[in-house]
Image (tube, helix red, strand yellow):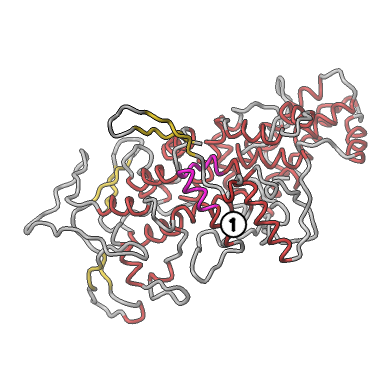
């Protein structure tokens, strides 16, 4: 929701007009989502899963919005709440939580870089970039604006994105078009695309916007970078790879907007020479191709940006895009729900790229809140008849171990070295296609690593300490154990087994408590979002 200021020509009348996102038939987006999804179920004769239980929803929404499981206290309060709107209230609370911005920055950091990007040594540790990106989400900067700032690379922290493409305009072309335009051009790098109307010359036309970029090391111990731009330089087109000959120089290609016109630019003055580039201020180019690309990419009439991010955010929360894979919105790859994708795209444009508002509607939908059970075995149901089950990321797993063990919200932040270990074993939980393959090293890590064991050892005020010192019945201890670690109460059989375990030899009480916590922390249920 936004307020727009209007004034008459004479300046004597001032109005504040409430601007609401456009909605299909004046319905909230969440209802549009549910209507389109249900129509597809009816057409395909699909029986969906029912509504998720409170414990399933609670764990899912915490992990999706703030990247960590709920605390025991948060779980207990939510499960006792009888308000019919308690889910909606919780969503609003989590969207206002500072951890939401941190989680979104983590998600998008991996979208923009992956774990091991090109120029790995320069970009492996990205605290400056993550800080910048977190700030964009914290102030709810509209998506088109922070994309603009990212690609202009003029703010401290944002410049690291281009570092991974140092002197590689073709790689920048592939990444930018896939991420922000939902278009895969890599096949047109060596030859005309075999399945889409994308030519090799069109690929190099987009590469022309990046060929003049210069990555300059800032020097010093922290090695900051700056992004400059030359006034001269073109991509040379030599034709199809199979037709190239040794010594062939190629023909300069003018920059050309994807699916649009060539860029109009004035030629440089005769005799112009590029100025020297030292460690001081970077000289401005006579004409900035980078600025023209960013103007076009983030323009309201751009046909790609809103559609691509609508599909990507949908996939972030629903497991797969309406177009799958998420970054392949080509003519031959049709959406599963075309009218829904159109509605999502129009909604993002109407709300001026407010992704937080868009996410609020999405996770409030009945579709998002479905149970994750059912006969279908596909990891990513094409018709969204049940919720996805996904493994926790390395960051989510480490943070959740601290919360489950009652070690406080700052525990994972103090364990930077431990995070390095977690990234090593859990850094790539999926391949983006819904596949998950647990490894032997992952299993051994969960079973033997001191990085796991430290979360189950007694410390003042943590879960193990409470289980050892609380003067309450053992049944209550078992309930708290399950609510703390798995965000749900135990089943009858689980309660009986854990009561028997914790009631064992009094001389081994600490060992029994540690083993009970460790069993739940290392089980498959804790590893996933259900």
Q: In which image quadrant can residue 5 be found? A: top left
In the foreground, 383 or 374: 383
Residue 193, horizontal then vertical, whole percent = 43, 74
Count how many numbered circles sit on residues in the image.
1
Residue 101, horizontal then vertical, whole percent = 52, 36
In the foreground, 22 or 299: 22
449 vs 238: above or below: above
Name the side, left or right, on which 121 lies relative to 93: left
Residue 11, horizontal then vertical, whole percent = 29, 29
Q: Residue at x 60, y 33 (%)?
A: 412
Badge 1: residue crowd in 10 Å (few <14, some 14–19, many ≥20): some
Q: Residue at x 35, y 44 (%)?
A: 159
Query: Is there any visible trace of residue 187 in the rendered image?
Result: yes
Q: Which range is magenta?
A: 344-358
Quadrant the C terminus occupies? top right
In the foreground, 172 or 294: 294
| Residue hosting label 1 | 340
């Amino acid at each position: 929701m936004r307020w727009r200021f209007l004034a008459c020509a004479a300046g004597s009348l001032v109005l504040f007009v409430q601007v609401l996102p456009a909605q299909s038939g004046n319905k909230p987006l969440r209802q549009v989502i549910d209507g389109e999804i249900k129509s597809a179920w009816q057409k395909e004769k699909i029986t969906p899963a029912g509504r998720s239980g409170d414990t399933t929803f609670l764990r899912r929404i915490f992990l999706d919005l703030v990247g960590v499981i709920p605390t025991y206290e948060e779980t207990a309060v939510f499960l006792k709440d009888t308000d019919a709107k308690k889910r909606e209230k919780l969503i609003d609370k989590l969207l206002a939580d500072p951890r939401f911005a941190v989680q979104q920055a983590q998600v998008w950091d991996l979208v923009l870089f992956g774990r091991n990007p090109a120029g790995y040594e320069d970009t492996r540790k990205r605290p400056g970039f993550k800080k910048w990106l977190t700030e964009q989400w914290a102030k709810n900067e509209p998506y088109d604006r922070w994309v603009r700032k990212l690609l202009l690379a003029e703010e401290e922290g944002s410049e690291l994105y281009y570092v991974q493409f140092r002197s590689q305009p073709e790689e920048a072309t592939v990444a930018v078009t896939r991420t922000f335009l939902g278009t895969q051009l890599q096949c047109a790098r060596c030859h005309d695309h075999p399945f889409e109307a994308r030519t090799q010359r069109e690929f190099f036309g987009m590469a022309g916007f990046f060929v003049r970029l210069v990555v300059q090391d800032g020097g010093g111990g922290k090695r900051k970078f700056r992004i400059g731009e030359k006034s001269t330089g073109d991509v040379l087109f030599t034709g199809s790879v199979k037709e190239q000959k040794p010594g062939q120089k190629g023909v300069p290609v003018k920059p050309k907007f994807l699916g649009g016109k060539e860029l109009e630019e004035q030629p440089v003055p005769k005799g112009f020479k590029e100025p020297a580039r030292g460690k001081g201020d970077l000289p401005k180019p006579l004409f900035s191709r980078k600025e023209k690309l960013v103007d076009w990419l983030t323009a309201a009439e751009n046909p790609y940006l809103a559609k691509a991010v609508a599909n990507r955010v949908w996939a972030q929360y629903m497991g797969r895009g309406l177009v799958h894979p998420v970054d392949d919105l080509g003519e031959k790859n049709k959406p599963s729900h075309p009218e829904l994708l159109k509605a999502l795209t129009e909604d993002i444009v109407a709300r001026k790229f407010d992704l937080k508002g868009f996410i609020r509607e999405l996770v409030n939908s009945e579709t998002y809140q479905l149970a994750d059970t059912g006969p279908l075995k596909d990891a990513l149901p094409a018709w969204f008849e049940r919720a996805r089950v996904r493994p926790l990321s390395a960051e989510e797993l480490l943070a959740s171990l601290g919360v489950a063990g009652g070690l406080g919200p700052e525990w994972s932040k103090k364990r930077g070295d431990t995070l390095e270990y977690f990234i090593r074993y859990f850094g790539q939980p999926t391949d983006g296609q819904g596949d998950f393959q647990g490894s032997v090293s992952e299993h051994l890590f969960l079973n033997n690593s001191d990085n796991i064991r430290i979360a189950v050892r007694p410390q003042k005020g943590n879960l193990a300490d409470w289980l050892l010192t609380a003067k309450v019945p053992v049944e209550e201890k078992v309930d708290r154990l399950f609510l703390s670690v798995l965000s749900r109460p135990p089943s009858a059989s689980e309660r009986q087994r854990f009561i028997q375990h914790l009631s064992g030899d009094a001389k081994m009480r600490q060992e029994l408590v540690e083993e009970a916590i460790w069993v739940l922390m290392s089980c498959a249920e804790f590893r996933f979002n259900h």
